[in-house]
Amino acid sequence: MTTTDQVDNQFPIVAKFNPIIRTYLLLYVAFILLVTVVGIILLPIWLLGVGQWWSRHYFDKLQCELTERSLHFRKGIIVEVEKTIPLENIQDVTFVAGPILRYFDLCILKFETAGQNSKQANDMELIGIIDAQTFRTQILEQRQKLIASRTSQPAVNADQQLLTEIRDTLQDIRQLLQDTSKQTNA
């Protein structure tokens, strides 16, 4: 089930990843090995076994889930990374699709969150989500709903209650002043 198969944002929304990520990651690391002196020696080992094993297991460990209040993400084989980002902390979701990524029919979603310095910005990246534009839209829409629900009705009711209490207190003070002035005049 892809993100577009969800009806009315029933939560959790689980993102599915494109299996072509395995080939992309295998070739991406192979390119890095090719441009390094030591990597040229390791390139055959990478292409003939280790890289295929790594890319398959990396793909199997990828998980991303959007809930009503947060985004959960998990990846990694040797070093597993698991992150939960509250939706109200997400400032922007950037959609990246360069020529090589488009060739593989892939894209990257980069998440910028509140409170990060420039070294940590875009710390969370998701590559290869099927129908990534729709998933990005769902994240931003749910974030807006969450923020709107926190700033709308309860705050107005709390303010209204406080104003009512202040008015009642002022009326009590006015009544006390009037009673005191009547007693001094009598």
Image: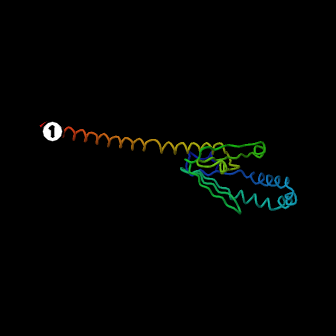
- Structure colour scheme: rainbow
Is residue 171 left or right of 19 when viewed as pictured? left
- Percent across and percent down for residue 34 are 85, 54
Viewer-side residue, 57 vs 178: 178
- Percent across and percent down for residue 71 are 59, 51
Viewer-side residue, 94 vs 114: 114
Task: Kindly indicate the quadrant of the structure image that contains residue 132.
Answer: top right
Q: Which residue is mark 1?
A: 184
Residue found at the far left of this picture: 186
- Percent across and percent down for residue 178 are 20, 37
Q: Compared to 61, does 186 lie above or below?
A: above
Element class at badge 1: helix
At horizontal 76% and vertical 54% (from top left) the residue drawn is 22
Is residue 145 left or right of 155 when viewed as pictured? right
At horizontal 71% and vertical 45% (from top left) the residue drawn is 107
- Percent across and percent down for residue 138 are 59, 44
- Name the kind of residue labelled 1 in the image: Thr
Q: Count the marks: how many?
A: 1
At horizontal 73% and vertical 43% (from top left) the residue drawn is 97
Task: Kindly indicate the quadrant of the structure image that contains residue 137.
Answer: top right
Quarter of the image where the C terminus is located: top left
Is residue 40 left or right of 24 when viewed as pictured? right
Residue found at the far bottom of this picture: 78
Local crowd size for mark 1, using a 10 Å CA cut-off: few (<14), some (14–19), many (≥20): few
Residue found at the far front of this picture: 184
